[in-house]
Image: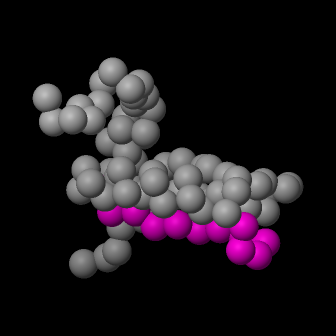
Amino acid sequence: MAEENWVIAYRVAGMVNAQIIIGRLQTEGIPSRLQYEAIGVISCSLDVDGLGEVKIFVPESFANQAKEILIQRFDENDLNWEGK
């Protein structure tokens, strides 16, 4: 069986943001990979002419599902902080 093509589902500045997004996708059962141009170890979001940008890839068959998940926005009232 041939390996499926992976496509870019999202682009984000900074590894911390990328890890949050990857975690969200994996929680939903969507395989994901990161690709980035390293400019050193920086904890803040920095994007200088593409450096610091992280591309998040998913298998092509998951692309639409991943994009639907990533466009969802939540505010504090949507989250169940205290298990109510």
Measured as percent of width and height from the top left, residue 64 is found at 37, 41
Residue extending furthest left? 84
For the magenta stretch, what is the residue range? 30-42
Measured as percent of width and height from the top left, residue 46 is found at 76, 55
The residue drawn where x is 70% and y is 53% is 45
The residue drawn where x is 15% and y is 36% is 83
Position of 61 with respect to 57 (left or right) is left
Q: Is residue 74 above or below residue 32?
A: above
Q: Is residue 46 above or below residue 71?
A: below
Count of marks placed on residues = 0
Position of 16 with respect to 31 (left or right) is right
Q: Nearer the viewer, residue 30 or 17?
A: 17
Residue extending furthest front? 82
Position of 8 with respect to 68 (left or right) is right
Q: Is residue 24 above or below residue 80?
A: below
Residue 12 appears anywhere in the view: yes
Measured as percent of width and height from the top left, residue 62 is found at 33, 51
The residue drawn where x is 40% and y is 63% is 32
Measured as percent of width and height from the top left, residue 10 is found at 54, 48
Q: Nearer the viewer, residue 81 or 18?
A: 81
Residue extending furthest right? 49
Q: How is the image coloured?
A: one colour
Residue 64 appears anywhere in the view: no
Q: Is 81 covered by the magenta stretch?
A: no
Q: Splitting the image into 4 quarters, where does residue 76 fall?
A: top left
Q: Quadrant of the N terminus?
A: bottom left
Q: Splitting the image into 4 quarters, where does residue 78 fall?
A: top left
Q: Is 35 covered by the magenta stretch?
A: yes
